[in-house]
Image: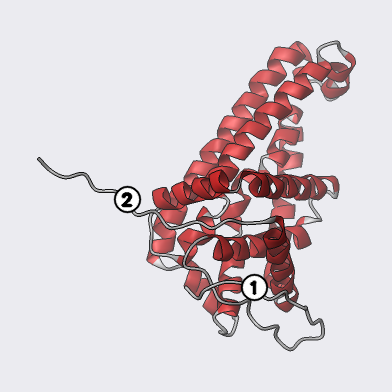
Amino acid sequence: MGSATTHNWPEVRSVSLDDLNEAVVAGIADFRAHPGYGIAIGAAFAVAGWLLFFALSELGLPFLIYPMAMGFALVAPFAAAAFYAVSDLRERGETVTPAAVMKGLTRERHRRDLGWLALVTFMALILWLEIAAVLTFAFGGVNTFDSDYLSKLLDSPSGMIFLIIGNLAGAAIGFAVFAITVISFPMLYHRDTDFITAMVTSVRLVEKNPVTMLAWAVFIGFIVTLSVLTAFLGLLILLPIIGHSTWHLYRMAVEPVRTSLPLPEPAPLNANLIPARLVQG
């Protein structure tokens, strides 16, 4: 009879609201030290958002604009991989250059398991769009393809029910994806591990820190909403800050953790960092 083996999952730590503040402060410092990467990636996603908006409008699918915009949060962690590279280089005291960032992103172990995890989040986005379409047809009926379908729907008695059910469904899917990805993408970038281990570790972190992680999820939801309300222009600043902050959250939440935040680089804009309380990994 073979003996059963127990998987040694990475140890996760307790994370407080002060730790979230510390991660955001460090993320802002990373962005201010190297804003070009964040602005370029944020601009690319803003343009993609505009193109999707016009494409869905031209295709007569206006009912998918809102769920597609809000579903951005499901795939954003994969887009933040470049921010993890920048933060990692700063943490190790190395010079941040495009070549160094690209080198970090193109390592074989990253391409394999980051790709699998990206596929999981993409499938979640497809599921969310399917649910949004079904709910819209169920409540909107033949008005769904009208340009003013939303105003007609909200004027109907079932309009509020539609909004409540739709947003609850989106929140449920969003939090499920959040639970498996909150630190799994930076973990896959940083460690030679598989995407299953990364997802389980992420869920264990959420399970151990439900209040703190719920606060982080609400904060990310607020950032996404703010980006949509600014016609995606907010992504130029908000996306890189969230990406860098997620890296620092991961580094303080999963053992082994770092000893301190990177020292600020000489620059016209100097960021004052809060000392971290971590162990070098």
Task: Return the residue at label 2.
Answer: 7
Residue 259 versus residue 100: which sits nearer the camera? Answer: 259
- Where disc 1 sits, the SS reads loop
Q: Is residue 168 left or right of residue 104?
A: right
Residue 273 higher or lower than 182, as above or below: below
Task: Return the residue at label 1.
Answer: 276
What amino acid type should be assigned to the residue bearing mark 1?
Answer: Ala
What amino acid type should be assigned to the residue bearing mark 2?
Answer: His
- Where disc 2 sits, the SS reads loop
Mark 2 and mark 1: span between their CA atoms? Answer: 30 Å
Residue contact between numbered discs 2 and 1, judged by CB atoms under 8 Å: no
Residue 125 numbered tag: none
Among the 4 quarters of the image, the one containing residue 266: bottom right
**Location of residue 136 in the rendering, given as x and y in whole percent from the top left corner:** 71, 20
**Which residue does the image show at 38% across and 54% down from the upper left?**
194
**Location of residue 135 in the rendering, given as x and y in whole percent from the top left corner:** 68, 19
Residue 90 versus residue 227: which sits nearer the camera? Answer: 90
**Location of residue 91 in the rendering, given as x and y in whole percent from the top left corner:** 58, 77
Answer with mark 2 or mark 1, whichever residue precedes in sequence.
Answer: 2
Among the 4 quarters of the image, the one containing residue 168: top right
Residue 152 versus residue 34: which sits nearer the camera? Answer: 34
